[in-house]
Amino acid sequence: MKIPFHSAPEGCTASNIHAALAPDAERQAFPLQDYAALGDGRSVPLVAPNGAITWWCVPNLDSEPLFDALTDPVSGGHFTLAPTIPFRSERRYRQDSNVLETLYTTEGGVARVTESLNSTLAGRLPWCELARRIEVLSGAMTLRAELVFGTRGDTVSPWLQANQNGCIFHVGPVLGLVRLSDAMRVVTQEDRTIVAEATLHQGQRALVAVIAGEDQPLALPPIEDIDNRIDISDAAWRGWAEGLHYEGPHRDAVRRSALILKLLLFSPTGAIAAAATTSLPERIGGDKNWDYRYAWVRDAGYTLNAFLRLGVLPESQAAFQWLISRLGVTGPKVCYRLDGGPVPPVLTTEAPGYRGSRPVVVGNQAATQHQHGIYGDIFEAAALFVERGNVLDQRSAWVLAGLADECAERWRMKDSGIWELSDLQHYTMSKISAWQALARAVTLAEGGHLPATYAARWSRERDRIAAWVDQHCWSERKKAYTFFAGTERLDASLVLAVRFGFDGPDRLSSTLDAIRAELSHKPWLGHSPWLYRYSGAEKEEGCFLACTFWLVEAYAALGRADEARALMNEALAALPGGIGVLSEMVDAASGDLIGNTPQGLSHLALIHAAVQLRDGKER
């Protein structure tokens, strides 16, 4: 007999199946495509197929983790809910929702676990509420819930404090309670570990939840309210998804990507995190491990673009408002903390890393870099915002005018480029981004949206940049724009120049051909849709997912529709089977996803590619 998930249409959402999983393997590292993500607009737990939550930062995406076995499998924390005997698991998200359902099948029965990082129809709760509901659908099953709290790299020592209202756990400044329904029996309760079990028969149900906060009085809702909020949260997600106005190719993938992006939107400020994790490697065993739990100007601009094209106005304004407010206070930075503060300097921890890939770090070196790309990202966001019929306030207009002046002054300088490299160069993509910024600034000024005092200078500098790029960054031998001035190496991000409207569609089309020929992964047999970021990257990292989707978008915008459709279909078919959550890269040899996850840029690129396929040629 086929045991149903929640009553959603068959095949409505991604699912994956895992057979013969063993209990007591809480710290097992799965391929990254196998991790599902939950969220409430403030933090994102990751759930493995064996029922282990091995990553959850509390209370915020960029806080220290409460559970961290993903990067510290030796002694990190986890929250595991699973059968006590070998089982098979099958998972999928509810239709148009980030509420997750898992079917566990053992020799004795079938159970469904529904889990949610709860919110309300009115928005997020003032505390973190991670709820996991158990329902036995047939037979009988014993399930165990085990919570082991992380030690933040041995900088804190978790402890329990019992009082008349419950048993409170403390992990540094984080405090909380584990809430159990009556069917759950506590087996172990120690300072760092809480274990509970329940044996349930068909028709019976139970609930396990974690209520947590940081340095705050903590309300303790009744267990019935927590249980009800799972379905309220599901309704809230579905209500949000109703606002996605997209009818076109790959509709299900676009909607799932939009839902994953929504997880990365930090609702207290409107910032968007690049990813929910730190230090997941760009190559297994490699050392290119970064902390992506911060807000990049680039991602804010691309998110605004994607959500505007999907008709999601509130999140679009929130992203743009956050971006402009930060620029007005601090001037242009590459990235910020989610609360708008400065990203901390890089600190290396002692954690052994995901699958032995070290270092595990906090902070990001990009915070101190200069990248000309931020100018283009900011002005592209502003131009799209206005193009959709929205208006700029006077303060935002003056902030943008000042940034245009700064871009006009600084574009001749070397920078770190879109790939945030330590090697300062005249990166072609950076120059094109500066061109993009000044081109949009001129258009905005001509439309009455920006002060036009220095618009004539912006226009002249725009034209100088275009001439400089054509003179210094074009390779006649490769018939392509190059990585930077004076090299023959290529850069896959240059396909974005099509979106940006850079001059010369013939040269851009030729550049796409060179990039596809030189930067594609070349397996022994057949061919691959995946691209490396730049010449030489194949020696040190996987293929960057966004690059392939950017190429699809560029093909479509240039009218190369057949190539665009073929590459999009090939890429989606080549993605490893999972739950619909994309990481930063794919390991070309194994086919597994690698890099931080969920990666906003990967989902953004997929959305842009699908929308451009729908809209067709622009140039």
Image: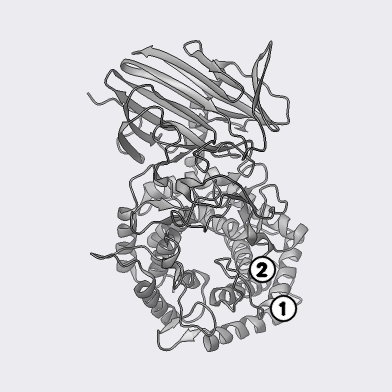
Above/below status of 95 relative to 458: above
**Amino acid identity at mark 1:** Glu
What residue sits 59% from the left and 79% below the top? 426
Q: CA distance from mark 1 to mark 2?
A: 14 Å
Percent x, y of residue 264:
55, 46
Q: Nearer the viewer, residue 610 or 394?
A: 610
Mark 2 or mark 1, which is nearer the start of the sequence? 2
Percent x, y of residue 606:
43, 56
Q: Is disc 2 surrounded by few (<14), some (14 to 19) or many (20+) residues within 10 Å?
A: some
What residue sits 69% from the left and 59% below the top? 392
Q: Is residue 534 visible?
A: yes
Percent x, y of residue 437:
62, 71
**Amino acid identity at mark 2:** His
Q: Give left or right: position of 116 versus 159.
A: left
For the residues labelled 1 and 2, say whether their Cβ atoms are less than 8 Å apart: no
Q: Quadrant of the C terminus?
A: bottom left
Disc 2 on helix, strand or loop? loop
Disc 1 on helix, strand or loop? helix
Q: Give left or right: position of 73 versus 551.
A: right
The answer to which quarter of the image holds residue 442 is bottom right
What residue sits 60% from the left and 61% below the top? 381
Q: Quadrant of the N terminus?
A: top left
* Closer to viewer: mark 1 or mark 2: 2
Above/below status of 48 relative to 287: above
What residue sits 31% from the left and 55% below the top? 574
The answer to which quarter of the image holds residue 467 is bottom right
Q: Nearer the viewer, residue 253 or 471?
A: 471
**Residue that numbered label 2 is attached to:** 370
**Residue that numbered label 1 is attached to:** 409
